[in-house]
Image: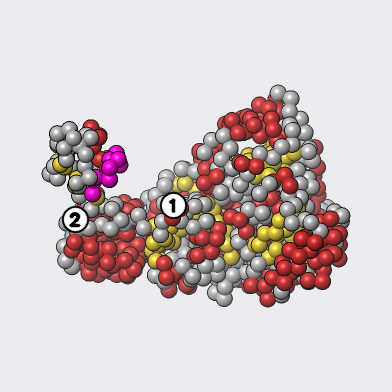
Amino acid sequence: MLTPLQAIKKKRAEAVNRIVSKGYLSTKRVYVGMATCEIAAGSKEVMDVFRQAIANGLTDVYLSQKGCAGRCNLEPTVEVVEEGKIPVKYGRVTPQRARDIVERHLKKGEIIAEWVI
Amino acid sequence: MDVKETRYKLTLCDGTACIHNHSKAVQQALETELDKHGLKDSVSIHLSGCLGMCTKGPILIVNPGYIMYGRVQVEDVPEIVESHLVNNKAVTRLIITEDHLYNRFFRIFGDVDFFGKQMRIALRNCGIIDPENIDNYLSLRGYEALAKALETMTPGQVIEEVKKSGLRGRGGAGFPTGLKWEFTANQDSDEKYVICNADEGDPGAFMDRSAIEGDPHTVLEGMMIGGYAIGAGKGIIYIRAEYPLAIKRLEKAIASAREHGLLGENILGSDFAFDIEIRLGAGAFVCGEETALIHSIEGHRGMPRPRPPYPSVKGLFGKPTLINNVETWANIPVILLDGADWFNTVGTETSKGTKVFAVAGRVQNTGLVEVPMGTTLREIIYDICGGIPNGKRFKAVQTGGPSGGCLPEHYLDTEIDYESLAKAGSIMGSGGMIVIDEDSCMVSLARFFLEFTQDESCGKCTPCREGTKRMYEILTRITEGQGQPGDIEKLQRLGEMIKHSSLCGLGQSAPNPVLSTIENFREEYEEHIQDKKCRAGQCTALLSYTINDKCVGCGACKRVCPVNAIEGVRKEKHRILQEVCIRCGQCYEVCKFDAITKA
């Protein structure tokens, strides 16, 4: 019988495994803000662009939603996080910008400086 | 800034304790060393507010990798630069290894100015994790605080820890949380309840919504710990139906917690049993008041009742009930894991920890800000939120929503805590913060808030029901140019009466916006009443538009006027018929010759 602390540590290890098995360690993690405020600013459409790109064969990307970080006037926000690199934070991401982020950043590694927060 | 070039971003703590420990000298040394190695363009230095590890200061965080160095001395700087920044090898002897719950956002947002002075405890996971996936929460030491409480602490010890932390209610009143827990725990009853007050109703406030939408599990974990501490088996989250996404995420979080054996019988193998359900509110502002909220859950009309007895003695269905706000609950896991001794190093003498503010209105960066208590209004409005846009002048900041007051410029350097805001004539409230610039009329603003409160008054007690309505009528009269001498005094007298004789917090605080604007902006009221002038140009009834000699008779104003109040022959000076004019200002907007005078 496990004690509560042992039990929670086991759960944590299992949780980490599940996240990793979903591709968390892929080269690029993409987080799309999906709180009410972000959705109102258009993040659902942005999310769809990334989903569609993955359905169309974009690989090595771990796509996740996230809550609101509090940057109201720059929403929708998208972060691209790569191990060993400074996370790139994009603001006011429209579906068109999202398509560009897929083509230029995720596929070619170019950071689109003008949209960076 | 060329983003591609930046290889490392350094965050240096710029809090008082670290400055005292010579962080400024470290910063200088860093700049010199970076220069020496030609790294000036590829490594950037950012200053942060207090990082909360004062005993280990000065603190330096190196990103990417979120390597945190402690007690960094000037002598250590060459080694850090050479080893870590040039050769990519971290300096092990200086690394702080403890995995704190707070401030995780620095990993991602450490280089954005907006976040620099923030400290995130309640919102620690917001915007970082997937709120709909319990694995994300579990992977960040989620529910470990609950496990720790169940395994290593008695309920009494949990309460002691919360008391020692100095945490006070984040819903507005600021009552010491630990005491509330103790009162409820001391009640002898076979049935007790834990309630999360998520009935966020202040106009412009969205702290609780964001907290729940971004990290619902932390609220659940806080409630479970509360349930364990006071001996309750059931928790209820009272949330307004206007927050469908927050509700959906809570439902999902509760379902996943049940699947993982974190809710229900024998939680984590212990003999503690607890479950949580959601009750939806219909959006009445008064239901944020605890006794009205309890009535609403019981199925009655949401109306407050006199206290005592307090809910901790006689609450939901007559049983002892512990009610805390979303943000208060979200602090609990951090207090248990990082310790009360750490928590009460953050903040001021009387107010510990952090507070989340929803900053809106006339600021460059509107948003959600969590800062240590004791941060000044100026730091929030100027350093974090980027100041007033379009070169306009700061006029006032309204804190605490419709129950708060308006603080003018000379309060900007006030260090915020429960006491200092009360002393200044406002309140902490739930954390709404509306910034007002010179274009806003203070009388209209007070009228706006009174319109809200008189509408939301439940009607049970006379001072609030009748009083707020009369105040609203007087304010309306003033903004329409019908103000009479003596109105200001009448408003003050009424306001004081309502404050002292209302049944609940709604009425007791409703006059605050009026009283504080009279106190700080009395001349604007006088101008409205005596001179029939609104200096901000917002009260349309007090405006008049006239055409001056610059008019060339182009006819643009005449074409745009919706009520045909402008007459004139082409190429000759036009005229506005004052009795027809509705003061919409369209002529003023359209005139290219500056020929329309607004007064």
Which residue corresponds to the image point at 49% horizontal and 65% vertical from the top-left?
A: B377
Residue B463 is inside the magenta segment: no
Determine whether B395 is above or below A14 in the image: below
In the image, taking residue B200 as reference, residue A75 lies left or right, namely right
Q: Is residue A29 visible?
A: yes
Residue A59 position by quadrant: top right
Q: Which residue is mark 2?
A: B481
Q: Name the mark on residue B390.
A: 1
Q: Quadrant of residue B453?
A: bottom left
Image spot of residue A56 (x, y percent): 70, 23
Q: Nearer the viewer, mark 1 or mark 2?
A: 1
**Badge 1 and badge 2 both on one subunit:** yes
Q: Is residue B173 above or below residue B206?
A: below
Q: In this rendering, is residue B122 above or below B278?
A: below
The mark nearer the N terminus, 1 or 2, is 1
Tell me the crowding category of disc 1: few under 14, some 14 to 19, or many 20 or more residues within 10 angstroms, Cα based.
few
Task: Name which residue lies at 71% across and 74% down.
Answer: B22
| Cα distance between the residues tagged 1 and 2 | 30 Å
For the residue marked with disc 2, what is the amino acid? Answer: Gly
Residue B519, quarter of picture: bottom left
Q: Which residues are magenta?
A: B589-597
Residue B130 can be seen in this image: no
